[in-house]
Amino acid sequence: MAKLATIFSTFALGGIHPPDSKELSKDLPVEVMPLPDVVTIPLNMQILTATPPVEAVVDKKAVLSEGQLIGKPIHFLGVNIHSSVSGTVKAVDTISHHMMLRVPGVIVDVDKNAPPPHWPARAWQELNSRELLDIIKETGVVGMGGAGFPAHIKLNPPPNSPVDILLINAAECEPYLNCDYRLMLERAADLLDGVKIIMKTLGVEKAYIGIEDNKPLAVKSLEEAMAERHQGIGLAVLKVKYPQGSEKQLIQAVTGRVVPDGALPAAVGVVVQNVGTTVAIYEAVALSKPVYEKVLTVSGRGIARPANLKVRLGTTVQQIIDYLGGTTGDLAKVILGGPMMGLNVSDLNIPVTKTFSGILFLTKEEAALDSFGPCIRCGRCISVCPMGLNPMETSAHAEAGHYADTLAYGVRSCFECGCCAYMCPAKRPLVQFMKLSKLKNPIR
Ligand code: SF4
Ligand code: SF4
């Protein structure tokens, strides 16, 4: 298959067009942050689990080399954790975490004079699917766009869900974020090799890269790399609309297939991986390199110097702030990820994990911190919901404490994209109401 015909389409229901605010960092090449003095490596870097997913396999005073295994899974959703630096273990202790408050972690004093490791190239074309899966598992790859689902599980779908399409999520539709964009500009050939590796792992013949038409330079970069050496991969250029990067919306936009409510993409024969994960799989398989670094966007008008940074896992937010010259006086809010679906943070000692895509430092003006008012029943939240939900009625029931009544409005299908809250003229915290309703109605 040569380059696919360019498709100008998008998903059908709802969606919004927030200002993309990408100009702050989109032209900044990925910069390698120098080694910090200490790294604080969490042993929880994947999708959340009820019990600890990983246990340390090193003790205090152990001398580590960069890329050495330091944590092994004790839960089926756990993944291997490797040291992001050479150095000496200062402590194995509980540390700050962006989701779990405190988790077990390994604190390492960094040896800045240690020689860099050599990661040997591997002839991956000669490996079969099982061997590729084993390497992906061994190197600790998870969904690097925020979900953190172990890649070796996602790329091994059950036999009753045969997959025929690999879809690479290159939409990066969250405002401010540019890390995937920079990878597409700077490492298009590696990305495409990663796509080939995943195709071979899954045993599929078709792969599409879904990208929005506000990234013409990335489209050009991918087209050039595809023309040279990567037949079999199609490029689907989509109309800009948030939340196009959500799996269900992207699948519909590119393939026309609709994932049933409550089902996974494999139910319609599709596996989705994002750009960062695909490059991580390339490095794991073709270069034998475990996951211990992360490219992320640091942006917003509340940081002295925005950047796209490659950092060692376990580098803290505060260490990144210090490296970039500090925050500005009008900083009002720090968010992990994008402003639509990201997480507010107050503890700047939290370390970077495999799932970070960005850290935003927003001023009051950028963060829109107005207090909220009563619903005026304008219906805008309903018209933009990509899942066809009714946030107006759901939030009214949640506000009254009638959480059971929110089930009738399909609250469990909400994936917290934030479109409704963005459009609400009364500034109602609709996502919080949806989250709370889901929490009060757990699936048993
Ligand atoms: S946050 Fe939930 S309810 Fe609101 S628009 Fe997104 S999916 Fe719909
Ligand atoms: S957008 Fe806000 S004010 Fe309008 S109906 Fe929805 S909740 Fe009410």
Image (spheres, rainbow, N blue to C red):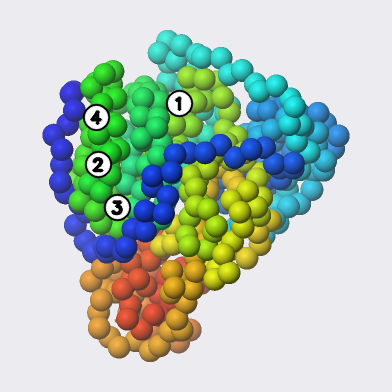
Horizontally, residue 76 falls left or right of residue 145, namely right
Q: Is residue 333 visible?
A: yes
Residue visible at 18% across and 28% down in the picture = 3
In this view, the mark in front (4 or 3): 4
Residue holding disc 2:
216
In this rendering, the answer to whether 227 lies above or below 419 is: above
In this view, the mark in front (3 or 2): 2
Residue holding disc 3:
244
In this rendering, the answer to whether 357 lies above or below 406 is: above
| 1 or 2: tag closer to the N-terminus | 2
Residue holding disc 1:
282
| 4 or 3: tag closer to the N-terminus | 4
| Distance in Å between CA atoms under marks 1 and 2 | 24 Å
In this view, the mark in front (4 or 2): 2
Horizontally, residue 406 falls left or right of residue 1, namely right
Labels 3 and 2 touching (C-beta < 8 A) = no
What numbered label is drawn on residue 223? Answer: 4
Labels 1 and 2 touching (C-beta < 8 A) = no
In this view, the mark in front (1 or 2): 2
Question: Could you classify mark 3 by the number of other residues whose Cα lies within 10 Å: few (under 14), some (14-19), or many (20 or more)?
Answer: many
Labels 4 and 3 touching (C-beta < 8 A) = no
| 4 or 2: tag closer to the N-terminus | 2
| 3 or 1: tag closer to the N-terminus | 3
| Beta carbon at label 4 within 8 Å of ligand 1 | no
Residue visible at 41% across and 62% down in the picture = 340
Q: Nearer the viewer, residue 183 or 167?
A: 183
Helix, strand or loop at disc 3?
A: loop
Helix, strand or loop at disc 1?
A: helix
Helix, strand or loop at disc 2?
A: helix
